[in-house]
């Protein structure tokens, strides 16, 4: 990767203020997306991946959601302190987003045509007629038949796959530098998922748009992303080039994730979920949040969150680092068995005082 | 049309707030709730104990002291025949509260019973009832109440009856919707599969589901009932002088507005605050028990 | 959807018929002898008998009803005893006044309601929100007649800012009739000062009426705004970088007002009741005052006429409101 990445997120912390207390949604996320690059952000529900993307766009639900600390830089410019007016200029034009549920993400009482033209007219000086022509073109480009007629119809008259295509059309209308797609295919029928995904990839490649793809589905990531970041409980646990992540994961959580997805030839074998459950986000994290479920944990894991640091010899051929946030990374031979293979190794028990009673901030 | 959908959406059993601790939690939840409870408590206390404490002060004319402003001996001043206004206002509180109670206690059970009947029996009974209630809904409520009161002859009792007649159709609709939704709910179908009769099931679940919504509507209606009675009395259709009903008093006070502002103002203020208290209470109860009910129950005024 | 409209129209007809039946018999029960009212307290028996025969007051009730219905179908509502004019003419004179008044009351109520609701929704659960809530409940709790009297006295008499009775200043001539609404007719025929005067006469009664409208509308719109603002499509609109005003107007308000439209029917009910009392207090010559006088005079024909008009208008208004809602929501329009 040469030069400053297009999007640079450093140590992002996001909190939500609720009547029940503070929710620690994102606890320290560092992430880079280079120009034209496709990066995957993977994690289960509640890991903070969607919140991260909303924070980048400046769309955290106010006043409850706020960025507590960290830096988000787009094209070298800090986004966090940016006034709303300037953020609006960026949104839709330089950075845009596609959401998970296309039915609820489209305004039910406005025509598709108007929803597409309004983004054009918000950022550029176009006449209504020109905007309509361009809108029709956009719809055609995303594979919607009879584009010109469809302009006058309403979202509920389209199928799920079509609606998502419209969302993609709107998001890419102004050739943004970065597209964030949050679970773009999750809400669609399985048969349509592949089509929409291909469309997304094809278009972003054509337009040289960087794509930050967020999903819980590793399968999608494998096909599409060049680099993957794995999130858990508000932290990025591991980032690596895709092939390397699958071939040689270093973080125990990633290992658990990969092993929990049954392969087609695992017939007859037991499922191997990760024991335990994700932590309660209302508690401030102390140490590594995965520690209670981790087979590799050492004493330090209970008290100090390890920083995200390189775990391979150096960057790979294209200059991409493999980093993990772990005090005791997994060794190559331990990956298949999903358990440490070191004689005499016992996962460190929790410290005598319960970890959650202390209120120290994570290191 | 829209109301049906909204009412059936609210058919889930509401959360119960129990006992004295519930009341305290309710008050603490919002200053509006606290205000509501304060106002209603004061008014109720005044209505219950006031007349005992004040005796016949409100009825004794004192022509030497007509239209006196507020003073130490007459907190709210005196009216056009020298009667103590405060005593009369307090007496009016008792009249208003009992009237509202009677109205609500007449309209709600009658309406609910008919509504439940219509919902359970269905068929042409249901149809007939619905058309019948539709006739009532074809009129703006206040106009209808005025017409009925005018027909029956001006008196407090007749206005109470008139307002009750105008209110019951809403309860019928409410109860009927609840029953209809209940009948479709899964647990009813499940129970039927296991052999219980529909009537038995619905009867048992009726109380839990219908009662809270009806209770909230009743408390909301209490405030509006007081307003209606006063408005009708103001027009001369309700309580007649010298009965110290707030509306009647204000009708008499109109002519003295320039010379004795207190005569019109105090009964009006008291009326406003009382209705405010009841409305806030109704709102608070509704939000407390099930915020989804917003927009379902009749709000605003008759 | 055409079928739906048809069904509703049939329903309106049914309701109207039911109304004529009920009101007819109800009005005949109202105490008071119209014949005596027409003839005067010292009329002779012969004169009374003559009047009764002229107006058909001596016929059996059922026959009177039939005669009334047949007249009705010919557009004849009879003669008002108190004004000595055809009821239809009275209605044509007084109804537009009430329309003007209620439209102004609606505007004065709805606009502040939307603004207040926007303010409250923006700062949800804050002191501002709860204060707005309080004003809304106050609006609904304050008796219209009391507010009317206070306004009349404080603003009209003490401050002298606005007139307190009638539609126009005493002795003033109304503008040439186009719609019957003085403000509109004045504007259309170039009698600007008459228009302004008519407007001034409506302000105080309209405010008295608007309080209830405001109270009802504010809470509905606020709840609706809160619900809509949390919707995903608003987030999409923001993500597209649309201007704040566009997001608010086109995306939020457009959707939030839908439930508010259904409340409009209720609003008309509130207004109708209020109009009755407020017109009486301000001696505003509209339908409300006409109805009040009709009841006091046991003027059967006038009572029937007004009641029919009110019932029809109310039912039609509700129908129109429902239709507007159906039209505004494309999910139903293009099912």
Image (cartoon, coloured by chain):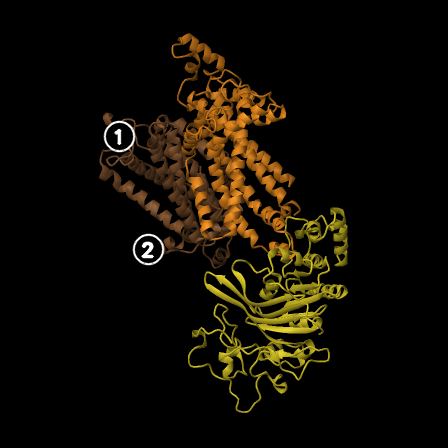
Q: Is residue C63 above or below residue A359?
A: above
Q: Earlier in the sequence, mark 1 or mark 2?
A: 2
Looking at the image, which is closer to me, A55 or A243?
A55
Please state the total of marks drawn on the protein image: 2
Disc 1 secondary structure class: loop
Residue holding disc 1: B83
Percent coordinates x, y for residue B2 in the rendering: 54, 44
> Which quarter of the picture shows residue C175?
top right
Q: Which residue is mark 2?
A: B20
Question: In the figure, the yellow chain has which letter?
Answer: A
The spot of residue C204 in percent (x, y) is 47, 31
Label 1 marks a residue whose chain is: B
In the image, A103 versus C132, the foreground residue is C132
The percent position of residue A157, horizontal first and vertical second, equals 68, 51
Left of A362 or right of it: where is A221? right
Query: Is C59 on the left or on the right of A57, as rendered?
Result: left
Q: Which chain is orange?
A: C
């Amino acid at each position: 990767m040469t030069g400053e990445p297009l999007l640079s997120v450093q140590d992002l912390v996001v909190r939500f203020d609720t009547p029940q207390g503070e929710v620690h949604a994102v606890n320290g996320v560092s992430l880079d997306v280079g120009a034209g690059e496709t990066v995957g952000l993977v994690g289960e529900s509640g890991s903070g991946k969607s919140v991260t993307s909303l924070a980048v766009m400046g769309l955290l639900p106010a006043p409850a959601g706020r960025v507590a600390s960290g830096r988000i830089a787009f094209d070298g410019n800090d986004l966090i302190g940016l006034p709303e007016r300037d953020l609006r200029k960026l949104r839709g034009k330089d950075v845009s987003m596609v959401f998970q549920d296309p039915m609820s993400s489209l305004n039910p009482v406005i025509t598709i045509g108007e929803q597409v033209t309004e983004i054009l007219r918000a950022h550029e000086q176009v006449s209504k007629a020109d905007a309509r022509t361009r809108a029709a073109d956009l719809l055609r480009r995303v594979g919607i038949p009879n584009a010109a007629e469809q302009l006058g119809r309403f979202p509920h008259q389209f199928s799920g796959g079509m609606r998502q295509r419209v969302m993609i059309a709107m998001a890419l209308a102004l050739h943004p530098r970065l597209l964030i797609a949050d679970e773009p295919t999750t809400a669609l029928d399985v048969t349509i998922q592949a089509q929409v995904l291909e469309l997304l990839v094809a278009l972003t490649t054509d337009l040289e748009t960087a794509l930050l793809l967020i999903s819980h589905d590793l399968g999608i990531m494998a096909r599409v992303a060049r680099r993957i970041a794995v999130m858990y409980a508000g932290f990025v646990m591991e980032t690596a080039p895709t092939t390397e992540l699958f071939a040689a994961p270093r973080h125990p959580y990633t290992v658990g994730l990969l092993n929990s997805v049954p392969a087609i030839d695992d017939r007859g074998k037991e499922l191997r979920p990760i024991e335990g459950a994700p932590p309660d986000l209302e508690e401030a994290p102390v140490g590594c949040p995965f520690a209670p479920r981790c087979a590799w944990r050492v004493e330090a894991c209970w008290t100090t969150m390890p920083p995200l640091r390189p775990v391979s010899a150096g960057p790979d051929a294209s200059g991409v680092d493999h980093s993990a946030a772990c005090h005791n990374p997994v060794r190559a031979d331990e990956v298949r068995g999903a358990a440490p293979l070191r004689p005499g190794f016992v996962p460190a028990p929790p410290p005598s005082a319960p970890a959650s009673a202390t209120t120290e901030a994570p290191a | 049309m829209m109301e049906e959908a909204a009412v059936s959406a609210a058919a889930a059993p509401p959360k119960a707030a129990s006992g004295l601790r519930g009341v305290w939690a309710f008050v603490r939840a919002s200053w509006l709730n606290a205000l509501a409870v304060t106002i209603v408590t004061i008014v109720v206390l005044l209505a219950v104990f006031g007349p005992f404490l004040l005796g016949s002060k409100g009825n004794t004319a004192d022509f030497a002291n007509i239209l006196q402003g507020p003073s130490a001996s007459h907190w709210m001043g005196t009216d056009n025949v020298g009667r103590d206004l405060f005593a009369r206002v307090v007496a009016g509180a008792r009249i208003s509260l009992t009237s509202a109670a009677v109205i609500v206690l007449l309209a709600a059970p009658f309406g609910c019973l008919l509504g439940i009947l219509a919902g359970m029996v269905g068929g042409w009974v249901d149809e007939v009832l619905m058309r019948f209630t539709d006739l009532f809904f074809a009129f703006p409520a206040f106009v209808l109440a005025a017409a009925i009161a005018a027909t029956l002859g001006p008196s407090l009792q007749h206005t109470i009856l008139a307002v009750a007649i105008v209110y019951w159709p809403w309860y019928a609709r409410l109860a009927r919707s609840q029953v209809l939704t209940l009948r479709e709910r899964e647990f009813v179908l499940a129970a039927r599969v296991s052999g219980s009769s529909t009537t038995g099931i619905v009867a048992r679940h009726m109380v839990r589901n219908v009662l809270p919504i009806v209770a909230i509507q009743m408390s909301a209606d209490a405030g509006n009932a007081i307003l209606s009675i006063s408005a009708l009395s103001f027009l001369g259709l309700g309580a007649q002088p010298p009965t110290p009903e707030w509306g009647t008093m204000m009708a008499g006070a109109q002519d003295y507005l320039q010379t004795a502002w207190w005569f019109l103002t105090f009964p009006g203020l008291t009326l406003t605050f009382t209705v405010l208290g009841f409305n806030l209470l109704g709102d608070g109860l509704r939000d407390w028990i099930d915020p989804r009910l917003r927009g379902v129950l009749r709000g605003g005024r008759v | 959807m055409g079928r739906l409209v048809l069904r509703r129209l049939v329903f309106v007809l049914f309701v109207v018929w039911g109304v004529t039946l009920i009101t007819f018999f109800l009005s005949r029960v109202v105490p008071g002898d119209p014949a005596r009212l027409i003839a005067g307290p010292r009329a002779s028996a012969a004169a009374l008998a003559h009047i009764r025969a002229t107006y058909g007051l001596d016929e059996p009730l059922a026959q009177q009803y039939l005669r009334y219905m047949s007249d009705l179908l010919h557009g004849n509502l009879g003669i008002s005893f108190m004004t000595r004019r055809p009821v239809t003419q009275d209605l044509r004179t007084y109804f537009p006044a009430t329309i003007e008044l209620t439209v102004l009351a609606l505007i004065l109520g709805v606009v502040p309601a939307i603004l207040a609701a926007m303010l409250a929704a923006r700062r949800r659960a804050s002191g501002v929100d709860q204060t707005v809530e309080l004003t809304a409940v106050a609006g609904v709790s304050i008796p219209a007649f009391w507010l009317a009297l206070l306004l009349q006295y404080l603003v009209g008499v003490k401050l002298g800012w606005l007139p307190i009775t009638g539609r126009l200043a005493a002795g003033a001539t109304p503008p040439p009739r186009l719609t019957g609404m003085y403000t509109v007719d004045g504007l259309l025929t170039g009698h600007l000062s008459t228009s302004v005067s008519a407007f001034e006469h409506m302000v105080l009664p309209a405010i008295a009426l608007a309080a209830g409208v405001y109270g009802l509308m504010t809470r509905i719109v606020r709840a609706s705004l809160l619900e809509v603002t949390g919707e995903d499509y608003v987030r999409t609109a923001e993500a597209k970088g649309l201007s704040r005003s566009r997001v608010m107007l086109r995306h939020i308000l457009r959707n939030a007002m839908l439930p508010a439209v259904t409340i409009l029917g209720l609003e008309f009910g509130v207004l109708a009741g209020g109009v009755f009392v407020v017109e009486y207090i301000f001696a505003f010559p509209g339908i409300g005052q006409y109805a009040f006088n009709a009841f006091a005079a046991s003027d059967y024909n006038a009572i029937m006429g007004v009641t029919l008009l009110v019932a029809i208008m109310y039912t039609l208004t509700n129908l129109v409101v429902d239709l507007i809602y159906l039209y505004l929501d494309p999910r139903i329009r293009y099912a």
